[in-house]
Amino acid sequence: MESRELLLQKWVSEQLGYDLAQLQTVSGDASFRRYFRAETGDADSAKTVIAVDSPPETENNPDFIRIARCLVNNGFNAPNILAVDEVRGFMLLSDLGDRLLLPELNARSVEQQYGIAMETLRALQSQLKPEALPLPLYDQARLMDEMALFSDWFVPRYLGYTLSGDQQGMMLKAYGKLAKSALSQPEVFVHRDYHARNIMLLEDNKQGLIDLQDAVWGPITYDLVSLLRDCYVRWPREQTLAWASDYFNQAQAAGLLDTTWTEAGFLQCFEWMGMQRHFKAVGIFSRLNYRDNKPVYLGDIPRTYSYLLEVSAAYEELADLHGVLKDLAILLMDKNPDAVELLKPWV
């Protein structure tokens, strides 16, 4: 039986009119998708396209295609769908290049790059409407299921620890508070992975968006916290709150938030939304290791966990949760000595 890569190569050749197109590996990701670059064969220019192997039994290809087409039609820099084999899960996309935002973020570039990303985010939230792009809702069940990944995969599998009955109760109570905060927010388009590994740097100070298939309608702070409290790069809490404050003012001016919203209320929703996301991310990083044999993400757990400690320490309503997280942090530091520097300030 021919490998999927060879089948993809033959399919791309058919689409491009080659005898046999050469595929250059670009990357894989946390899913089962794989990406390759191929030259188009245009004699007048060295144009390239991206070939995607996205197994339909594991990946949400129809939604990726639908969302990408909607974004492109609304003027956003998302991959243009050039060809699709829905049965086998092959796609041919326009090439947004290979300049990810993450490696180019530094103290000098971050203000400009985050400014562009937040401007794009406001446009997404303002222009995209549910009637034109039906998507699932980020409802109570989804929010709670995501946070449960922390309790189900990180605590017992990575830490090898069993929560006591009291600890389980405190965690569930906290999860409920975080979900309630999320559901109190205006519903907008949510990319769900709007961070520096999914933002491409293009020419003329423009940015492109990838990894679109998991989008939903949900809380206005979700993508903002994904960007500003990224699991892969960390900025001081005071700086991220300043950026979030700027976003609040701009979102209110754009009509995304009505006048009943205060800056303080928005910032609490922003921070608590971050906790929901970081509980999910820590759980997913653990699951990727134990279920999918992808240990590389374990190195991102300490940074992500540090957000949980930092924010829970700042709110009296989360004091019980903070106590549980401190206990678990001691186990995490024993498991991973590299976590000590990041976690020690709150333990």
Image (cartoon, helix red, strand yellow):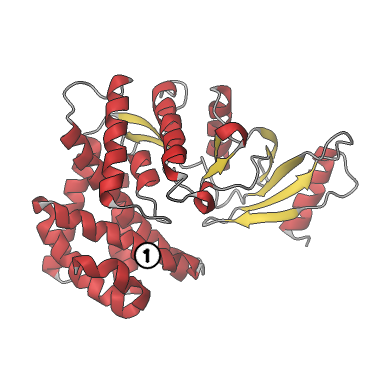
Asked if 32 appears above or below 136 in the picture, the reply is below
Can residue 100 be seen by looking at this rendering? yes
- Residue 5 picture quarter: bottom right
In the rendered image, residue 277, in percent from the top left (x then y), is placed at: 32, 50
Q: Is residue 54 left or right of residue 41?
A: left
- Residue 285 picture quarter: bottom left
Quadrant (top left, top right, bottom left, bottom right) of the C terminus: bottom left
In the rendered image, residue 104, in percent from the top left (x then y), is placed at: 53, 50
Can residue 193 be seen by looking at this rendering? no
Viewer-nearest residue: 314 or 71: 314
Viewer-nearest residue: 190 or 134: 190
Quadrant (top left, top right, bottom left, bottom right) of the N terminus: bottom right
Furthest toward the bottom, the residue is: 334
Furthest toward the left, the residue is: 316
Q: Residue, x 51% and y 67% (percent of image)?
A: 294
Residue behind mark 1? 301
Q: Residue, x 70% and y 44% (percent of image)?
A: 50
| Residue at disc 1, secondary structure | helix
Q: Is residue 309 left or right of residue 146?
A: left
* Amino acid bearing label 1: Ile
Q: Is residue 55 left or right of residue 182?
A: right
| Neighbourhood count class around disc 1 (C-alpha, 10 Å): few under 14, some 14–19, many 20 upward | many
Asked if 313 appears above or below 88 in the picture, the reply is below
Furthest toward the front, the residue is: 108
Asked if 92 appears above or below 291 in the picture, the reply is above
